[in-house]
Image (spheres, rainbow, N blue to C red):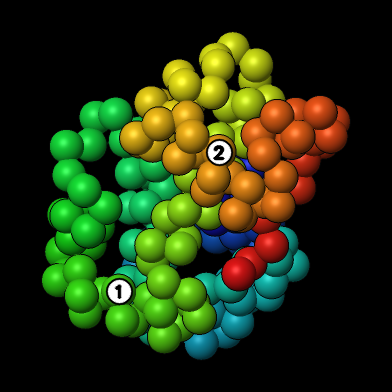
Amino acid sequence: MVCRHCVEAVRKALSDAGFAVRDVALGRAEIEDADVSADGLRRIDGALAGEGFERIADADEALVESMKRAVISHVRDGNGCRFNLSACVEEHVGVDFARASRIFSRLEGRTVERFHILQKIEYVKELLGYGGANLAEIADMTGYSSAAHLSRQFKEVTGMTPTEYLRSGAAGRKSLPEV
């Protein structure tokens, strides 16, 4: 889950499946039932699948989801983060970055650094769409050393410059494909 709409969709799906939902946040959901039977797990899996989600039961998959949340938080709330990416991920997941990064790459088929870049570019696209900041300000807000660096990476990922992106009428933008 990567947005508040996803959180609400999961909350509703679990509630509609008959579970008393305690809390839903990015990447996790808590229900009141302390001991869920095999039938209950099947109902949860069905409810989640109906919304395009799946339950994570594997420890490595849970670690990857936790890393994704850490990266998203690092990108979106980076101004308050005093750590570099690896230190930030380690702080959030409590696992050595090298080990966690190997697990991430094995399960995701891409590096955590690549995921980080894709998240930054998605955030840049949002900020460009809002129209309230120039490229230098957006570069500063998203942790790029310069507007030129941001532009180079933006073009590498999207195939167009930020200016071309804006001119393309990308207000109805689509997320980046999984790479």
The answer to which of 163 and 112 lies nearer the viewer is 163
Q: Quadrant of residue 47?
A: bottom right
Query: Residue 151 has which mark?
Result: 2
Image location (x, y in percent) of residue 9 = 65, 50
Which residue does the image show at 55% across and 60% down from the upper left? Answer: 19
Side of 141 relative to 167 (left or right): left
- Residue 160 vs 62, above or below: the answer is above
Disc 1: which residue: 101
Q: Earlier in the sequence, mark 1 or mark 2?
A: 1
Q: Amino acid at mark 1?
A: Ser
Q: Position of residue 79 (x, y in %)?
A: 29, 29
Q: Position of residue 6 (x, y in %)?
A: 61, 49
Give the residue displayed 38% in from the left and 37% down from the top: 144
Q: Quadrant of the N terminus?
A: bottom right
Q: Position of residue 15 (x, y in %)?
A: 61, 54
For mark 2, does the 10 Å Cα neighbourhood hold few (<14), some (14 to 19), or many (20 or more) residues?
many
Query: Which quadrant holds the C terminus?
Result: bottom right
Query: Is residue 177 at all visible to an observer of this figure?
Result: yes
Q: Quadrant of residue 45?
A: bottom right
